[in-house]
Amino acid sequence: MSTPVSDSASRGAPSSAAAADTVVPTGHDMPRGVAALVFLRDRGIFILWLLLILVFSFWCAPYFFTWSNAMLIANAAALTAIFAAGVGLGVMSGVLDLSLPGTAAFCACLTGWLAVNKGVSLWIAVPIALVCGALVGVVNGLISLQGFNPIIVTIGTLSVLTGLASVITGGLTIPGLDGLTFMGTRRYFGVPAPVYIVAALYLVGTIFLTRTRDGIRFMAVGGNAEAVRRSGIHSDRYKVMGFVISGICAAIGGLVATAITTEANPDASPAIIFSALTAVALAGVAMSGGRGSLPRVLVGALILATIANGLIIRGVQTYWATVITGVLLLASLGLERFIQKSVSDRLMATSNLSVHQKKV
Amino acid sequence: MTSTDVTTPALDLSHIDLHYGYVRALADIDFHVMPGEVVGLLGDNGAGKSTLLKVMSGAHRPSEGTIRVHGKEVSFHSPSDASEAGIQMVYQDLALVDAQDISTNLNIGREILRKGPLGWLGFVDTKAMRKRAESELDRLGVRTAPMTRPTEMLSGGQRQVVAVARSAIRVSGDANGVLLLDEPTAALGYEQTKLVEGLIRRMADQGIAIVIVTHNLPLCHEVADRVVILNRGRKVADVPMRGTDPDHIVGWITGARPSMFEDRAS
């Protein structure tokens, strides 16, 4: 390794939003091959997305590469992106929360019921929904802390919440929530409202994960809870926090879905959690936790929407979008394993050298 | 050793007994370590070294006996009690956060916050933390990789160094603490073992009291001032490393050589 150690500090100074994902550090201080591989691992999804845009721009010209189509894609990706943020943040902290669709349906129906049946102002009903999402997370977290498998626990709460949503609404949808269009179909400066919500959610989430003490610990607990515990930190608190953040994201997702259709639907759609999981997996967020970045999750959601959009423009049956997404996901797994192996081979070759460096 | 003038042991255990049901895992053990001293704790499998280490680290409570830290009697109910008293354990499974860099691993739990309103919101000062981690590793003489390197991309020796340094930093505060190392060089190659040995000696020179549990006699030869040997839950030898015949040590470990303290056996 010829890089002087003092240069390593200059790795920081990330300016753009994409570069803000310093959670998995980039490899500017590595041997050259490793640096390139780590770059591919951490930034590969951005390259993939740009490639997709490039291909569709030519293949679907002149309809694809326009401002209005970009807004269509962004809007189509918004709902997946919100849930993907919930799933992604949960997985990074080491919990997979499958109750998200139930939380979303429950919170949406609660808001609808309060607003329509009880005449509560939306300015009160919407915050109540968000608090409810957080409370669901606390319950999920406290049950999981008893040593039960989070997946089973959240399947249980999914069932409970879906049932409760139907109980609230009497099994029917609650229509007439026109007051929510400000966060649904309304556009501001030509950009649909959900896109702003996604942007704000990911910005706050990314800053939280990479810049704040709690975010860094949150991520570390996902990576190795024991290490954090031995550093004298109550790691349990951060596990519950994972569920709470997931729950809040689900509540936001439920509200946005309700706002778009202006009716609160008690039928939870488990499909949303799978498209969210696809975006998360495509973004290279390790299911074992402690690894990943939100900007990549966002691009994962955008890739799903971009593929669907491009194929629709070309008149290809939409089923093919699902097929291509699946193939991409499997290919990304293969690529990740290849990179992992190459990096460790390269580091093995140089590890003994680096031990000698700066030995006092 | 810089701190030979200090006469109070950093950690002093006397008449420690520990029973697991009918099994007497530790029988009337006396053990102490001075500030700046490296004590090797030797013994065959099942001799009770790990159990004794767990008593020191607060993971086990002894059935009988007293523990003193810097002369003050203490009673540990959990590892965090021991940690608060200035005793840190480095386990064999290093427990590093693999995906995070060296700086984060060293700073977690004692992060530096930014000044001003951003600090109130919990924003960390990454640069300051890197600088501090760098200077702390420099002081230990083991800065072998950039602070921004994720620990999963370090060699085994470097990972061990980071894990030991993380604990060393936490005990070298106001009063010099005690560092308990469980097989610190297991699974390390020759060069990497040398790196860790150097680190152990330098920490001792800075006044940290160090207890090493190991099977590795050459390691003790390199770094230990004194060795304490256990056999079937009893202390059978407590001798300075220098000038002791290695064959005698092996004899004590295997039980072929009679205990130095036969008169005290019950």
Image: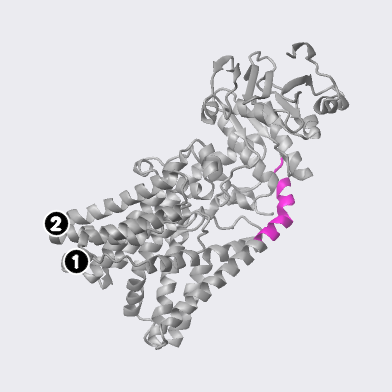
Q: Are marks 2 and 1 in contact (CB under 8 Å)?
A: no
For the point 40% across and 65% down, which residue is it? Answer: A273
Q: Amino acid at mark 2?
A: Ser
Same chain for labels 2 and 1? Say yes or no: yes
Which quarter of the image is occupied by the N terminus of chain A? bottom right
Element class at badge 2: loop
Chain letter, disc 1 residue: A
The amino acid beneath tag 1 is: Ile
Q: Is residue B210 above or below residue A155?
A: above
**Left or right: A331 as drawn, with respect to B120:** right
Q: How is the image coloured?
A: one colour
Query: What residue does disc 2 label?
Result: A121
Judged left or right of residue A126, residue A37 is right
Characterize the local packing of mark 1: few (<14), some (14-19) or many (20 or more) Cα atoms within 10 angstroms: many
Query: Which residue sits furthest front?
Result: B22
Give coordinates of residue A200: x percent, y percent: 33, 59
**Quadrant location of the C terminus of chain A?**
top right
Whether residue A217 is visible here, answered yes or no, is yes
Where is mark 1, residue-wise?
A174
Residue A36 visible? The answer is: no
Residue at 39% from the left image edge and 43% from the top image edge:
B122
Q: Is residue A289 left or right of residue A158?
A: right
Residue at 16%, 68% in the rendered image:
A176
Tell how many labels: 2
Name which of mark 2 and mark 1 comes first in the sequence: 2
Is A231 a magenta residue?
A: no
* A73 vs B24, nearest the viewer: B24
List x then y, in percent, for residue A288: 53, 55
Asked where in the image residue B199 lies, by quadrant, the reply is top right
Q: Which residues are magenta?
A: A343-359
| Image coords of residue A63 (percent x, y) | 36, 86
Rendering quarter of residue B178: top right
